[in-house]
Amino acid sequence: MSTFQIAARCRRMGTEAAFRVFARAKTLEAEGRDIIHLEMGEPDFPTPEHIKEACRQALADGHTGYAPAGGLPALREAIARYVARTRRIEVDPAQVVVTPGGKPVIFYTYLALVEPGDEVIYPDPGFPIFESMTDALGATRRPWHPGSGTDGRPDLDRLAELMGPKTKLLVINSPGNPTGVVYRREEIQAIARLCVEHDVVCLSDEIYSRILFGPEHVSIAAEPGMAERTVILDGFSKTWSMTGWRLGYAVAPPDLAPIYERLMTNSNSCAVNFVQHAALAALDGPDAEVEAMVRAFADRRDALCEGLNAIPGVTCDRPEGSFFAFADVRGTGQDARALADRLLEEAGVACVEGPAFGDGGEGCIRFSFAADIERIREATRRMADLLRA
């Protein structure tokens, strides 16, 4: 058997723990176990029917060939209108690049901008791919705490300390995964001033921008001096329950968007043609199902936080956006990794240990409330029973 000399960048690259937990949970289900899935960032609602119908029609009309690397012109135009309306900024369709999911936008931004030795500031706890790509490209980690839920606000003083001449990229994520934080306008303004002062590009992950429980979504791209140094990451997976359709997009400065198109050509060629036609229906269609889904998420959030906070030793700040709650379990006296494993193996509750999202997640567990409300209540009962045993 051959021994491969794996490139160092791949050895440095991390992974995403939610998929590991999901795989183990499916194995246990195959063995007959009843598993409550609170591990994945995936709405449990069906994709709205008008979107599925548009896909069926696109297939019937023969839209099964290649699409342009940057996306179908009609979709790029529709996304430009949508982003301009929802962020109150001007967007040229040429700035839009359609990708197979949101992760390629992270991948392409790092590839386009980050060199070995550059410093990347990213949220910790945060989406693990931010740290993974920092390591893969030989950049220097500069993690900062993004805040959590309602009470834990971002550490802007620490962010200011981290900014320096080697800072190449700042990653922000609001509404945030895993903590559910939503940045206030004054916080976004302070972050924008730092980016302008230090001439730093910002990758703004706004994939949960429509899943809000009170606060408004404020995009840093709308702040003075930020249009030319912000990449917006968004997509269709969360808002329209289209995770398996794999469709996202970048809105990038004019000089950077063609680089994303080049990277698309060199990696995926294009996003799936008929799926892009379905995305047009998502943007142009009714929003009633999206709004109903968000209302359901709010009820589920309340049920999950109430159940978690009733467990001795567990505290959970109420998330203001996304569909994740980040519970502090240090008061139980148990290690978060070990407790997450026990919850799955012994109680049948799939969740993700906080350290999977960075060192800042130590002592915490992430629970998704993209699940039926009664199953959420059952999950907190099982957790309480496990800790009482």
Image: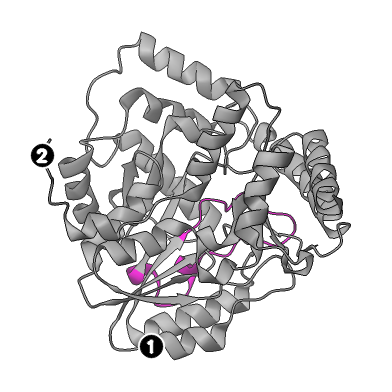
Residue placed at 24% from the left, 54% from the top?
A: 10
The mark that comes first in sequence, 1 or 2, is 2
Span shown in magenta: 205-229
Residue placed at 34% from the left, 11% from the top?
A: 61
Could you tell me residue 167's position as x and y percent?
A: 32, 81
Q: Quadrant of the N terminus?
A: top left
Q: Is residue 172 left or right of residue 351?
A: left
Identified by mark 2, the residue type is Ser
Say which of marks 1 and 2 sits in front: 2
Identified by mark 1, the residue type is Glu
Front residue of 166 and 276? 166
Residue placed at 60% from the left, 57% from the top?
A: 337
Way the structure is coloured: one colour
Q: Is residue 97 above or below residue 378?
A: below
Q: Is residue 369 in view?
A: no
Could you tell me residue 147's position as x and y percent?
A: 62, 72
Front residue of 31 and 234? 31
Residue 318 bears which disc, if any? Answer: none
Residue 2 bears which disc, if any? Answer: 2
Q: Judge the density around disc 2: few (<14), some (14-19), many (≥20) Cα neighbours within 10 Å.
A: few
Q: Was residue 294 drawn as part of the magenta stretch in this picture?
A: no
Residue placed at 35% from the left, 41% from the top?
A: 76
Q: Was residue 225 drawn as part of the magenta stretch in this picture?
A: yes
Q: How many marks?
A: 2
> What secondary structure is the magenta-colored segment mainly?
loop
Q: CA distance from mark 1 to mark 2?
A: 51 Å
Q: Secondary structure at mark 1?
A: helix
Front residue of 300 and 344? 344
Q: Secondary structure at mark 2?
A: loop
Which residue is under mark 1?
Answer: 197
Q: Judge the density around disc 1: few (<14), some (14-19), many (≥20) Cα neighbours within 10 Å.
A: few
